């Protein structure tokens, strides 16, 4: 049988040999791996991938409601098509997280990590030490579908390329244009109507509406139980960043890191940020902000919209119905971006990514990387990616008259999200913005949000999000601890300044503390990584 030889080494490719380069912790010592795919009748084109059944072990995460992947119809079809049988060891996120570090440290690895659950630091560390195989040569030789996408989309290639030039994990991409604007601002229009107030379009009109909610008993129960405005700090979708922008002119996000005109900026030490926080502090002193905004979790937060008596005037969240329930959906409307004190509308852009890495990795235990990469490449076909993401054709998807895949409505008593967990394995996949036009239609709820983003947020984009850069080991060491300390300080001061009104007296000391924590060095490191990403990840 013909065996392909792979080397795990800090070296370069030589003629006739495919080298999987990566530091193994032993300097330039090469750990040689023979690819034994040919032992199973490996086919470089067509199906099946191997003539004799090849068994592999896969591990990683899975959705809470997902069965063992071997029970999924789509997964069973993959095995029938490829003749590659997989023993699945995927676990719910929390369970897997508890076992992941032990697995990586002990070397007791599956052949493949699928939905790897690896952080950027773990990808870089386990790639550079040889635990994960470099994939770029395998992609070039055995993944024509993915190779074509990466050639067309250098941004995706850059997102999965480490600073050493290697690709250690495969991507997951879903380009719906939604995650850049997670914090939708809603207001109780029933209360506005009851008080004879217009839908606010400026920050001053919005303030006046909140003040009326606080003082004029809009729910009509004779009790001052109204909550004019509630939010959460450091939440995925409940932050008041757009109010900071409207009150002070500073675009903001959870990372306190934005990009404008190619420059990486820290947001939480500017005069504009100070003005925004000062404005919210004034609102708090007037009784317009829920005191629990700085301590509540999602459960407590979401319960306020469904309280027996309607008490919530305005809030930030991803989806209206999730906050207030079916019975009150018609009582609220999206505010969108308010005209600020300077007459501008500024929509803050988050750093949430549509290009994800860590969808799949091949470990050093795998003796069949060529066959494994051919298996993975099938998942990047747009139709297969749609099924990996939402479920199989005939179960969750069907073709409409135009040949576009559309959602089959979920059965009574089951939401689309619950069904998706049970039938869609996730993993490596790419559905581009173009694919959402020509291959698969967005879920109805996703299309609704797309339309709202297009109308209410995108026209007022105030910054760029920081791109999906994979920092190097050295860069991660430079920023990790400092960033944690910096973000902790910003979060603590944001809350205390709004509640206590002490920002003026403490501002200079706070700025100095940020400098001592290394904020300038952190931003310089992110700028360096950003520039590398813009050059294609090299």
Image: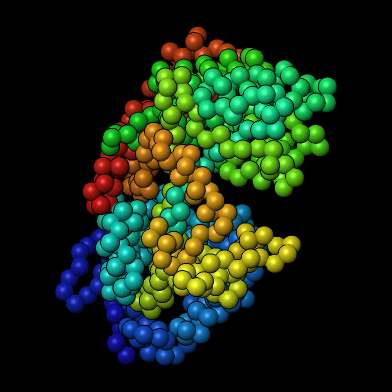
Give the camera-side residue of 251 and 361.
251
- Residue at 56 percent across and 21 percent down: it is 205
Q: Quadrant of residue 514?
A: top left
Q: Residue furthest left?
A: 15
- Residue at 28 percent across and 56 percent down: it is 154
Instruction: From the viewer's perspective, tell me whether residue 94 is left or right of residue 165.
Output: right
Colour theme: rainbow
| The N terminus, quarter of image | bottom left
Give the camera-side residue of 90 and 221.
221
Q: Is residue 39 visible in the rendered structure shown here?
A: no
Q: Is residue 175 above or below residue 113?
A: above
Residue 310: image x %, image y %?
A: 76, 34
Residue 424: image x %, image y %?
A: 56, 67
Residue 489: image x %, image y %?
A: 50, 26
Residue 227: image x %, image y %?
A: 70, 26
Q: Residue furthest right?
A: 222
Q: Is residue 264 above or below residue 421?
A: above
Question: How many numbered marks, from 0 up?
Answer: 0
- Residue at 25 percent across and 52 percent down: it is 536
Q: Quadrant of residue 299?
A: top right
Instruction: From the viewer's perspective, tell me whether residue 2 is left or right of residue 351.
Output: left
- Residue at 27 percent across and 51 percent down: it is 537
Q: Is residue 342 visible in the rendered structure shown here?
A: yes
Q: Quadrant of residue 14?
A: bottom left
Give the camera-side residue of 467 and 228.
228
Q: Is residue 433 above or below residue 244?
A: below
């Amino acid at each position: 049988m013909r065996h392909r030889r792979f080397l795990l080494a800090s070296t370069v490719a030589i003629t006739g040999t495919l080298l999987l380069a990566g530091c193994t912790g032993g300097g330039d010592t090469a750990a040689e791996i023979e690819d034994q795919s040919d032992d199973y009748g490996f086919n470089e084109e067509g199906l099946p991938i191997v003539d004799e059944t090849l068994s592999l072990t896969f591990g990683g995460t899975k959705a809470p409601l997902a069965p063992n992947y071997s029970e999924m119809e789509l997964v069973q079809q993959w095995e029938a098509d490829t003749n590659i049988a997989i023993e699945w060891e995927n676990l719910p996120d929390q369970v897997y997280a508890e076992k992941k570090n032990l697995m990586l440290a002990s070397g007791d690895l599956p052949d493949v990590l699928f939905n790897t659950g690896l952080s950027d630091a773990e990808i870089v560390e386990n790639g550079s030490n040889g635990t994960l195989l470099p994939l770029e040569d395998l992609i070039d030789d055995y993944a024509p579908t993915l190779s074509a996408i990466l050639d067309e989309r250098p941004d995706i290639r850059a997102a999965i390329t480490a600073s050493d030039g290697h690709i250690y994990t495969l991507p997951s991409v879903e380009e719906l244009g939604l995650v850049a604007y997670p914090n939708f601002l809603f207001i109780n229009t029933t209360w506005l109507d009851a008080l004879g107030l217009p839908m606010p379009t400026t920050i001053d009109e919005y303030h006046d509406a909140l003040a009326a909610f606080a003082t004029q008993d809009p729910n009509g129960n004779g009790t001052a139980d109204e909550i004019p405005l509630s939010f959460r700090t450091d939440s995925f979708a409940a932050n008041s960043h757009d109010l900071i922008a409207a009150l002070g002119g500073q675009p903001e996000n959870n990372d306190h890191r934005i990009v404008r005109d190619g420059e990486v900026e820290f947001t939480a030490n500017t005069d504009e940020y100070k003005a925004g926080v000062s404005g919210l502090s004034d609102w708090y002193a007037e009784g317009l902000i829920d005191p629990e905004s700085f301590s509540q979790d999602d459960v407590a937060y979401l319960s306020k919209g469904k309280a027996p008596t309607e008490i919530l005037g305005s809030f930030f969240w991803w989806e209206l119905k999730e906050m207030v329930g079916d019975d009150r959906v018609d009582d609220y409307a999206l505010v969108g971006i308010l005209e600020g004190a300077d007459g501008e509308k500024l929509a803050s852009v988050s750093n949430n990514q549509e290009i994800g890495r860590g969808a799949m990795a091949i470990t050093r235990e795998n003796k069949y990387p060529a066959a494994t990469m051919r298996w993975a490449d099938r998942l990047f076909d747009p139709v297969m990616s749609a099924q990996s993401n939402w479920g199989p054709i005939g179960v969750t998807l069907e073709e409409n008259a135009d040949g576009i895949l559309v959602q089959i409505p979920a059965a009574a008593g089951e939401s689309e999200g619950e069904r998706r967990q049970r039938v869609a394995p996730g993993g490596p996949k790419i559905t581009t913005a173009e694919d959402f036009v020509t291959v698969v239609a967005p879920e109805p709820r996703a299309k609704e949000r797309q339309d709202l983003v297009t109308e209410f947020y995108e026209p007022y984009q105030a910054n760029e999000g920081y791109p999906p850069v994979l920092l190097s080991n050295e860069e991660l060491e430079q920023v990790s601890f400092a960033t944690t300390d910096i973000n902790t300080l910003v979060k603590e001061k944001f809350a205390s300044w709004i509640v206590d009104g002490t920002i003026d007296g403490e501002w200079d000391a706070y700025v100095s503390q940020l400098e001592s924590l290394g904020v300038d060095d952190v931003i310089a490191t992110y700028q360096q990584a950003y520039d590398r990403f813009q050059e294609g990840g090299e």
